[in-house]
Image: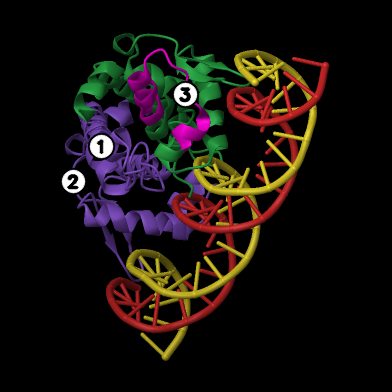
Chain colours: A purple, B green, C yellow, D red
DNA sequence: TGAATTGTAACTAATCTTGTTACAGTTATG
DNA sequence: CATAACTGTAACAAGATTAGTTACAATTCA
């Protein structure tokens, strides 16, 4: 269970919220569609709220709705809101600094990571939540 | 220790082999530069050998050298040779199939995964091992 | 006042990656 | 031809991450 599916779940529940319009949706209902525990959903919704993609309300008749229109939410924003880690990891232990390659490889790989991340965000910026909605239908 | 650093290590040791030219390099030596166990290196070299990027020889005075010239080895080939998993994972449990979103979201996400993977490979195809060598120096 | 809901902490279970030991098989070399 | 030096590979331990779960405080509506 060590594979990160936060982006998948985020797109899923945001699509659900998009279909709900202005009505507030409860974490319990979203959890049933995703087939997981409500707490998993609420954890994720907290991140999405920090990124201003959703607005949650506590208390009775509380719940969550989109903070922006589906056509204004790019998938790249969702990605940045929930995906923390990098595409690939650097060495767990620092390489031998007495070796010319070992000493300088980290800088090269770091630059590469940033370029790849830009590529992904650029690709995901091509789609909005509205596009996902259309694909679902 | 659950972050995948195979691509990092692969680029590292292939760069080492590139500096060694036609001479065979031992896994022990590579392991010292990466600062890890020789078995970790040999496991990775097996993958790189399957992808025809290196040629290893067993026995005394054995070792590994590049199977192609550095300027012909694209970083995208290295990526494909060692990175198995996807950028993001789909839901561990299958979503509720009675929900229109739950039923169709997997197809959308799968398509997205493939597009992202293409983006990454396209970006990594811009660089060869020769380019990395130049950056190191 | 009471019921319903979010936010969050704490813990468990499953899974992945690396590190390590061990050893069979292969090859160069004295 | 015997020995030493390698690779290839299996098996297992250790560490880290993620999702799932329980529990409960805080908030809000009726």
Tell me what residue is drawn at x 23 percent, y 38 percent.
A107
Badge 2: how crowded within 10 Å, few (<14), some, or many (20+)? few
Query: Does the magenta segment cover residue A120?
Result: no
Q: Which callout, 1 or 3, points to the residue nearer the camera?
A: 3
Residue A42, percent across and down? 39, 59
Dot 1 falls on a residue whose secondary structure is helix
Q: Are marks 3 and 2 on the same chain?
A: no
Residue occupying the point 54% across, 17% down = B56
* Chain letter behind tag 2: A
- Chain of residue at mark 1: A
Residue that carries the numbered disc 1 in the rendered image: A104
Residue A40 visible in the displayed image: yes
| Foreground tag (1 vs 2) | 1
Q: Is residue A25 visible?
A: no
Q: Chain of mark 3?
A: B
Question: What residue is pinned by disc 2?
Answer: A68
**Distance of mark 1 from mark 3, alpha carbons?**
20 Å
Q: Nearer the viewer, residue C9 or A114?
A: A114
Left or right of residue A26, residue A101 in this image: left
In the displayed structure, A82 sits above or below A110; it is below
Res A11 → quadrant: top left
Do circles 1 and 3 both sit on a common chain?
A: no
How many angstroms separate mark 3 from mark 2 (CA)?
57 Å
Structural crowding at the residue carrying mark 3, measured as other residues with C-alpha within 10 Å and reported as few (<14), some (14–19) or many (≥20): many
Q: Which mark is residue B25?
A: 3
Q: From which residue to which does the magenta span run?
A: B11-31
Residue at (40, 38) in percent of width and height: B33
**Label 3 SS:** loop
Question: Which labelled disc corresponds to residue A54?
Answer: none
Q: Is residue B14 above or below residue A61?
A: above
């Amino acid at each position: 269970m060590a594979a990160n599916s936060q982006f998948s779940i985020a797109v899923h529940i945001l699509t659900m919220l998009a279909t709900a319009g202005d009505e507030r949706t409860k974490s319990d209902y979203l959890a049933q569609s995703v087939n997981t525990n409500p707490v998993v959903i609420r954890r994720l919704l907290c991140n999405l709220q920090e990124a201003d993609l959703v607005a949650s309300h506590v208390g009775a008749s509380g719940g969550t709705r989109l903070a922006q229109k589906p056509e204004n939410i790019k998938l790249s924003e969702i990605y940045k809101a929930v995906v923390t880690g990098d595409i690939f990891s650097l060495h767990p232990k620092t390489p031998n600094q007495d070796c010319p390659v070992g000493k300088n490889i980290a800088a090269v790989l770091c630059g590469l990571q940033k370029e790849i991340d830009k590529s992904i965000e650029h690709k995901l910026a091509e789609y909005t939540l509205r596009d996902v909605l259309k694909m679902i239908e």
